[in-house]
Image: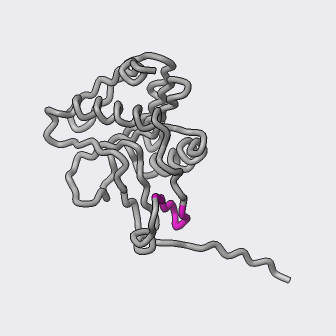
Amino acid sequence: MQNLAYEEYYTVDDYNHWEGNWELIAGMPYAMAPSPMFNHQYVTGKIFSILEQQLDDCPKCFPAVEIDWQISDDTVVKPDVLVVCKREKRVVSTPEIIFEVVSKSSIKRDEQTKFNLFEKEGVKYYGLVYHEQKRVKVYEHINFKYQKIADFTDEGVFELLIKDCEISFDTKILWKKF
């Protein structure tokens, strides 16, 4: 007897009708955890604030928090913070920067599933922020692969360059009140 396993497959049309907080990756739904804890949201806000301030004079680039990025007909993700350099009603172009604040419930998805997805999609910078360890890892997309360009515990400064706009990111600002 043949063992046939059937997986359900969903599209953006399905996703647009769901209630709650979801991501859709390659047709597979992922429930987002309930509203993140205070420290997670605080760090997310600090990252957005740093990017907003650094990009204030850049006419091309805009940071956003927890906004849908529709990659394809079967993939929609909601990064904690992203920077796009094209104003769109709905984000469909590849962001320049994505930061995920990693929690226990999201670690596998952030470090593996999304890492591989964002690398494949050509996101220029991908940052993983571990607020409990006061650690930031940043990867740059070079020659179709991510290469780690920063790995700081506690404090450090790294530079990002997008669309002729420079960003100096000082991690001690993230941990100032921790």
Q: In this view, does 164 lie to the left or right of 149?
A: left
Q: Position of residue 39 (x, y in %)?
A: 46, 32
Which is nearer the eye, 145 or 12? Answer: 12
Looking at the image, residue 8 lies above or below residue 64: below
| Residue drawn at (40%, 64%) of the image | 72
Most prominent secondary structure in the magenta stretch? strand
- Residue 29: horizontal and vertical position, in percent? 54, 63
Q: Residue furthest right?
A: 1
Does the stretch in magenta take in 24? yes
Q: Residue at x 42, y 17 (%)?
A: 156
Residue 70 makes an appearance in the image: yes
Q: Position of residue 162 (x, y in %)?
A: 27, 36
Q: For residue 70, what is the image quadrant?
A: bottom left
Residue 142 seen from this side: no
Colour pattern of the rendering: one colour
Residue 115 at what x, y percent from top left?
Answer: 51, 44
Residue at 29%, 23% (x, y): give it. Answer: 168
Q: In which quarter of the image is residue 31?
A: bottom right
Above or below 170: residue 16: below
Q: Which residue lies furthest to the bottom in this view?
A: 1
Location of the N terminus by quadrant is bottom right
Q: In this view, does 1 lie above or below 109?
A: below
Front residue of 98/163: it is: 98
Count of labels shown?
A: 0
Q: In this view, does 36 lie above or below 130?
A: below
Q: Nearer the viewer, residue 94 or 170?
A: 170
Left or right of 14 in this view: 93? left
Residue bounds of the magenta highlight: 21-29
